Image (spheres, rainbow, N blue to C red):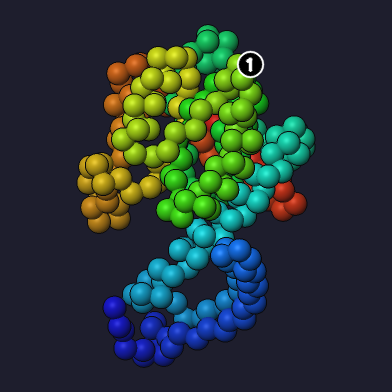
Amino acid sequence: RWQLSNDNDIPVIQSRQASLGLSYSKNGWLVSAEGYYKKIKGITTQSQGFYTGPKTLCASEFVQACDELRLRKELIENKNLIKVNGIENLNEIINDKEQAIFIAIHQSNWEILAPTLINFGIKINSVYRHINNSHIDKFILNIRQKAYQTNISQKNKSILSPKGKKSAQDMIQSIKNGYSIALLIDQKDSSGIDIPLFDIPAKTQIGFLKLAKKFNLKIFPIENNRYKNLNFEITIHKP
């Protein structure tokens, strides 16, 4: 909404932006990319401009996460790049040959969470949100399949299930087949329930809670932090 600036607690918003883009067209296909640097002063929570930051950040984080995912071999196999805390919590289910539900949010590089769990020998069904553009979705899915080792036939280490009605069926079937579940829970779910978030009703998914109760599965929250030079820290919290 519009707010009248008083040059005190509601300052005049100022911004500077520089952008550079490239486009390539061939055989009816158009590929374009644009990067920009934007610096804003004077944003307050009372301004609608406050909401433009997270959306831009989410998009850039997604591109960065997918780009880093291409380096899965270097990231996962180089133990110096990803520090994992709470390994004792993983060993708890690995030694007892149990299944579990791992939950996280779109934080740092969320795409490396499942491959890290798979590297510990845990069979994972990862639920993902498909991209509306079918061409980009196919491209990203190919990167994910390689990173999540879905093409390894010997042990079927992981499954990728698109978010929606089918994923619910896939999760139930995969649990019956001995897989654990990994999903991000900070996405809007139209079939969820309203839970107050800062006193504002927000649709929240609870399907994983029903699965945990039905199949008696532990729920492990995962925290993920990115540092410089492709260094990450993943913490597996207690269930």
Circle 1 residue: 154
Where does the image place residue 38, in percent across and percent down from the top left?
A: 57, 76
Where does the image place residue 199, in percent across and percent down from the top left?
A: 25, 55
Count of all numbered marks drawn on residues in the image: 1
Answer with left or right where residue 196 lies relative to residue 117. Answer: left
Q: Residue at x 57, y 84 (%)?
A: 16
Regarding mark 1 in the picture, which secondary structure is present there? loop
Can you name the residue that lies furthest to the front here? 27
Where does the image place residue 46, in percent across and percent down from the top left?
A: 34, 75
Q: Is residue 96 above or below residue 17?
A: above
Q: Nearer the viewer, residue 68 or 221?
A: 68
- Residue 23: quarter of image: bottom right
Q: Is residue 82 above or below residue 218?
A: below
- Packing grade of label 1 (10 A; few <14, some 14-19, many >=20) is few
Q: Nearer the viewer, residue 54 or 145?
A: 145
Q: Residue at x 75, y 32 (%)?
A: 77
Q: Is residue 139 visible?
A: yes
